[in-house]
């Protein structure tokens, strides 16, 4: 049973029809997947935290002029967003070697890269999101050259902004994934930032200890997964002190306090 028409269900989020044409409601689940959904689990309270973190980040990005799909947060697990035509490309920005880059190229995890790298992956679960080059994007018409220029410019701006934002709270931004969508205004379209920005799609390491504060704790069975997500939210000032011990059951906690 559902309150409204479900448009799409992904691994970590559900999209529902929004209250007005051109809007959608993005619902954040606690479900987590890794390794192209071969590993599945739940991270208790993750949806609540990612909703808040993504709201915080997208609002801050809008304030520096990066256009995003975010309109406003509706409640603990939902936000109102602009409907976009998703560009089927995952944009990965890397500052430090980790994950698939370390594995593929044999570069030790944690090595600072001499310059930021942007990589593109084709969004296709059946194919396991293969890495692609600009040539493939142009050849198969997934995005125009102008759109790719805008995407690369925005990805660099997001990286600069987020690197500073996380550095200020003692976190090193290792790498992250972005998704973009197309919005239409008559015959013209433009590209805006879509999806979410949260510890699900970023690598975040504590600057002093190199402790991982992101989904790698789930991928690598490191334990303390919920606590890591909470720690990021806490350092961003998004968790009240009295929420800290109750965040695992944040929904119930909020209801009890009548919020
Ligand atoms: N990432 C993601 N979704 C994906 C693949 C990667 O959010 O489907 C993020 C991941 O969390 C990391 C960055 O993109 O912050 C780079 O991931 P990588 O290519 O190293 O892949 P992984 O090691 O996750 O397989």
Image (spheres, helix red, strand yellow):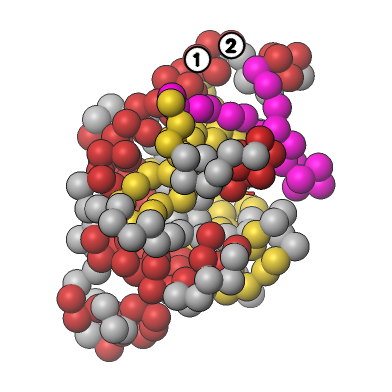
Residue 51 appearing in the image: no
Q: Residue at x 19, y 72 (%)?
A: 240
Q: Residue at x 50, y 14 (%)?
A: 149
Whole-Å distance between the Cαs marked 1 and 2? 6 Å
Q: Is residue 61 left or right of residue 51?
A: left
Q: Is residue 134 above or below residue 57?
A: above
Q: How far from the left and from the top, in percent, is residue 112?
A: 43, 36
Front residue (pair 94, 103): 103
Q: Is residue 56 left or right of residue 194?
A: left
Residue tagged by mark 1? 149
Quarter residue 127 falls in:
top right
Residue tagged by mark 2? 145
Mark 1 near mark 2, Cβ–Cβ under 8 Å?
A: yes
Q: How far from the left and from the top, in percent, is residue 228?
A: 39, 67
Q: Residue at x 53, y 47 (%)?
A: 109
| Residue furthest out toward the right | 126
Q: How crowded is the residue under tag 2: few (<14 C-alpha within 10 Å), some, or many (20+)?
A: some
Q: How far from the left and from the top, in percent, is residue 148?
A: 55, 18
Q: Secondary structure at mark 1?
A: helix
Quarter residue 243 falls in:
bottom left
Q: Is residue 96 above or below residue 10?
A: above
Circle on res. 198: none
Q: Quadrant of the N terminus?
A: bottom right
Q: Is residue 240 magenta?
A: no
Front residue (pair 1, 126): 126
């Amino acid at each position: 049973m559902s309150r409204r028409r479900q448009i799409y269900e992904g691994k970590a989020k559900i999209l529902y029809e929004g209250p007005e044409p051109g809007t959608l409601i993005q619902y954040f689940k606690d479900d987590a997947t890794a390794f192209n959904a071969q590993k599945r689990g739940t991270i208790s309270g993750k949806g609540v935290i990612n909703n808040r973190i993504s709201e915080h980040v997208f609002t801050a990005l809008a304030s520096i002029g990066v256009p995003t799909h975010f309109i406003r947060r509706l409640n603990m697990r939902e936000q109102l967003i602009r409907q976009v035509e998703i560009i089927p490309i995952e944009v990965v920005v890397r500052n430090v070697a980790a994950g698939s880059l370390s594995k593929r190229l044999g570069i030790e995890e944690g090595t600072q890269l001499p310059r930021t790298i942007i990589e593109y992956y084709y969004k296709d679960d059946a194919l396991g999101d293969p890495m692609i080059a600009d040539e493939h994007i142009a050849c198969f018409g997934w995005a125009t050259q102008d759109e790719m220029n805008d995407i690369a410019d925005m990805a660099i701006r997001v990286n600069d902004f987020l690197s500073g934002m996380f550095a200020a709270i003692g976190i090193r931004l290792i790498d992250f994934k972005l998704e973009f969508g197309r919005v239409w205004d008559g015959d013209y379209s433009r590209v805006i930032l879509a999806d979410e920005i949260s510890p699900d799609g970023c690598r975040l390491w504590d600057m002093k200890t190199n402790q991982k504060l992101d989904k790698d704790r789930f991928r690598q069975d490191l334990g303390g997964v919920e606590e890591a997500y909470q720690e990021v939210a806490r350092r961003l000032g998004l968790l009240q002190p009295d929420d800290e011990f109750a965040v695992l059951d944040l929904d119930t906690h909020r209801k009890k306090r009548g919020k």
